Image (cartoon, rainbow, N blue to C red):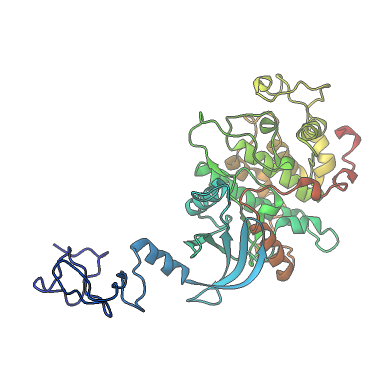
Amino acid sequence: MAASPLVERPAHPPSLKTAPSPLRQPQLAGAAQFSSANGTPNGARPAAPTSQAAGQAPLLDLAEQLNLEERRKYVKGKKLGEGTYAIVNLGHARADPTQLVAIKKIKKQKEYTEGLAPDAVRELKHLQELAHPNIISLLSVFSTKDQNVCLVLEYLPLGDLEMLIRDQDGIRYGTADIKAWMGMLTRAIWFCHENYVLHRDIKPNNLLIAADGEVKLADFGLARSFADPWSVMTSNVITRWYRPPELLYGAKHYGGAVDVWSVGTVMAEMIVRIPYLPGNTEIDQLQLIYDRIGTPTEENWPGVTTLPGYIPPERIMPVQPKANFLQTFGTVGDEGVDLLFKTLTLDPRKRITAREMLQHPWWRAEPHPTRKQDLPRKSASLGEEKMAADLKRQPGQTATEEDRGKGVARKLDFGSAMK
């Protein structure tokens, strides 16, 4: 029978005649000699037996060997940032120093003594399952000597979309650029949903930019599979400004429509260059939805009053027609407004799907999407700092909405028809 490839056989196997009995202690160098058969020592006590010869490297099991080999593939460079949950270092592949990577070391948390935090496990699981040009690539995983887990991610040096949206003085972009970014985001979400994965935290600072201009969806710490439509899921996901009304009402059963709503709010933010629905609390978030999109009722959303967190509104605001959206978002054209309008439909069952978004006529209308290498971008140094700040957050940790755009988002006049 062929020898197992996992077992290293010695070049000169020991002879059966000279093999010591397993019931006898081996003779140790420098140990005291025994003068009688009953083991009475002549002198000092013998030194404790060791499992290996002095100076010999410790023997590793197969898993340890594989982990060590994986760790040796990368060279860790300068520290990019350190937070409560992770340390991010720049690195490169040992075989190719030009291949830069981001090494994210996830720190052990005191409350999880027997393994990784659940959000770190989710991020690791889903990034291993999803391979797409518009999703950040997980290149490798290994553990360190102190039992922390390191994720080796592709290096995305140009920051995120939030940087571009906020920099109104330094960055200029138009409909063709928005169309290119939205196409990349929509393809990423379509691929997730085709593989029965909900991202559940889509927002501009989770959309990182590669050196060639490609947008990559990152931070899968809140993601989960949704193959079983009857499984109960938490409603406390998605950063508040991008959270759909069904989750604000406490829905426990939902699908890809929650991500599509988030995509719509990101599109609106790209156009007006400030968050579209920046609620300070969940009640305030619902009120903004009522004022700018419409109040959910049994007429426009059958069954909404049965959701566990439904709150009867003090007044009913009619669903805003598409014409009102044109007043605020008309720069992307009629077809672009139509797509945005369908992503922000109140009833999730009537909301457009990611697959239907890719089939929308807006992509074929003028102007055509900008080539990725021609898209606006920030400097690599600023992008590197922003990438480090994002990666060192706990997977799935939501940024503080009030710290971003507070006192600014309300300055835009969305028109009297939207109030």
* 60 and 53: which is toward the camera: 53
Q: Position of residue 252 (x, y in %)?
A: 59, 29
**Front residue of this view, candidates 378 and 385:** 385
Q: Specify the quadrant that holds the N terminus.
A: bottom left
156 to 95, vertically: above or below? above
Q: Is residue 80 left or right of residue 55?
A: right
Q: Quadrant of residue 8?
A: bottom left
The answer to whether 280 is drawn above or below residue 150 in the figure is above
Residue 345 falls in image quadrant: top right
Residue 335 appears in the picture as rendered: no
Q: Is residue 366 left or right of residue 114?
A: right
Question: With 223 as the anchor, is 43 left or right in this view?
Answer: left
Counting from the top left corner in percent of width and height, residue 347 is at 67, 28
Instruction: From the viewer's perspective, tell me whether residue 43 is left or right of residue 312.
Output: left
- Choose between 346 and 70: the one closer to the eye: 70
Q: Quadrant of residue 247?
A: top right
Name the residue: 80% across, 44% down.
Answer: 329
Residue 330 position, x and y percent, is 81, 44
| Residue 205 at x, y percent in the picture | 70, 54
